[in-house]
Image (spheres, grey):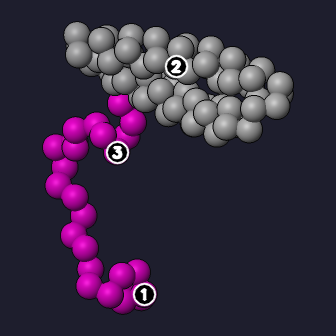
Amino acid sequence: MGVYAVGVTFCVVAWGYLVFAAIDFGGTAREGRGIAWLFLFVACIGAACCLFAGLMLGMRALISLGLVTPPADEQPAASTPPAERVPGGRRALR
């Protein structure tokens, strides 16, 4: 759980810094500096990635605390064995 908390904190701080940098680069780009558009683009992509990673780590933290149930494909399998797979698929069953 502690690793998730540190990861979320790092991602949120990095996201905030990149958003601030993107705003600053946007102002600089509007003043006529062409290279600032590239830095603005990179800062926006980085901020979006940090936000996504922070949300994913936050969800993992909530799952590990037991506050949220994991999606159905990640839950442990029930005690019933899986159905046997028929060669040929559904068409072969007809």
Residue at label 3?
73
Residue at label 2?
15
The magenta stretch is 68-94
Q: Secondary structure at mark 2?
A: helix
Q: CA distance from mark 1 to mark 3?
A: 26 Å
x and y percentages locating residue 62 in the rendered image: 36, 16
Residue at point 22% right, 58% down? 82
x and y percentages locating residue 8 in the rendered image: 38, 16
Residue at point 37% right, 40% down? 72
x and y percentages locating residue 49 in the rendered image: 50, 33
**Quarter of the rendering occupied by the N terminus:** top left
For label 1, the crowd category at 10 Å Cα-Cα, with few meaning under 14, some 14 to 19 and many 20 or more, is: few
Type of residue at label 2?
Trp
Q: CA distance from mark 3 to mark 2?
A: 30 Å
Type of residue at label 1?
Arg
Type of residue at label 3?
Asp
